[in-house]
Image: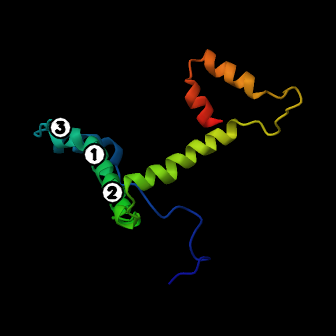
Amino acid sequence: MKDLKDIADKNPFKVPENYFEEVNRKIIASNAGKVNETKPEGIYRRLKPFLAVAASVAVLILLSYTALKIFRPSDITGKLPEISLQEFSDTYLNDIDILTLEEGIPAVASYDGVHEVSNAEIIDYLIVENIDLNEIYEIL
């Protein structure tokens, strides 16, 4: 093998003689009998981007559904304690009503301006309201 010192400083590659004059003629001669036919674009090629989007949405829905089935407990109602309607209304609804009433009461009630009301004044008021006298005496 030759050393780098033995290679001359000139380019060792050469272009064949009359190459550029004959290259156009050779290309035209090789394609002269052929007719360039283009096929119409098929329906699959036109719908390919839409099919890709539809497939990716379907995969996303499938993965979401699977994840929800795996990570969410399937039988929530079996774990709830069974209570009757009467227990529910007694326990929860009454508590809610009491809580709302308690919230409506002012924190500090001031009775400075209230004077004593006598039984006679109460009886007079109840008579004006058409309450029976027998019921008034039963209550008092």
Residue 41 has which mark? 3
- Which amino acid, by three-letter code, is at mark 1? Ala
Q: Residue at x 31, y 45 (%)?
A: 53
Nearer to me, 14 or 107: 107
Q: Residue at x 48, y 51 (%)?
A: 90
Quarter location, residue 120: top right
| Number of on-image labels | 3
Above or below, 61 relative to 75 = above
The crowd level at tag 1 (other Cα within 10 Å; few <14, some 14-19, many 20+) is few
Q: Report x, y in % for residue 131.
A: 56, 22
Query: Would residue 102 be found to the left or right of residue 92 on screen?
Result: right
Q: Secondary structure at mark 3?
A: loop
| Mark in the foreground, 2 or 3 | 2
Q: Secondary structure at mark 2?
A: helix
- The residue carrying mark 2 is 65
In the rendered view, how is the structure colored?
rainbow
How far is disc 2 from disc 3 in space, using C-alphas? Answer: 37 Å
